[in-house]
Image: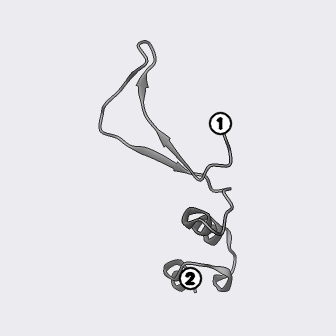
Amino acid sequence: MDKGLPLYHVERIIQETKERFEDGSHIIYVNGSYKNDDDPVGKLMHDFRCTSSIDMFYDELKNTVK
């Protein structure tokens, strides 16, 4: 698995038949280690790693942390 991707979309399958298990669930994992300040997900992960609101990009998080 490429650890540099910001998001991973996961689909369930039936192991024995390799068919997709269509239960209506949609699983998306966000890579917390992803770093790219030019990308919205990268900016969000940056903000989650910040220890000071001054260094954050997104005002919604910045204001909550203050």
At 63% from the left edge and 83% from the top edge, which residue is drawn?
53
At 59% from the left edge and 65% from the top edge, which residue is drawn?
39
Quadrant of the rendered image containing residue 47: bottom right
Please, is residue 59 above or below residue 48 in the view? below
Mark 2 and mark 1 lie on one chain; the one further toward the N terminus is 1
Residue 64 percent location from the top left of the image: 51, 82
Q: CA distance from mark 2 to mark 1?
A: 32 Å
In the picture, which quadrant includes the N terminus? top right
Q: Residues within 10 Å of mark 1 (few under 14, many from 20)?
A: few
Please, is residue 54 above or below residue 8 in the view? below
Residue 17 percent location from the top left of the image: 41, 13
Q: Residues within 10 Å of mark 2 (few under 14, many from 20)?
A: some
The amino acid type, in three-letter code, at marker 1 is Met
Quadrant of the rendered image containing residue 23: top left
Relative to the observer, which residue lies in front, 5 or 33? 5
In the picture, which quadrant includes the C terminus? bottom right
Please, is residue 8 above or below residue 63 in the view? above
Q: Circle 1 sits on which residue?
A: 1
Residue 12 is left or right of residue 57, and the answer is: left
Give the number of callouts. Answer: 2
What is the number of the mark on residue 62? 2
Q: Residue furthest top?
A: 16
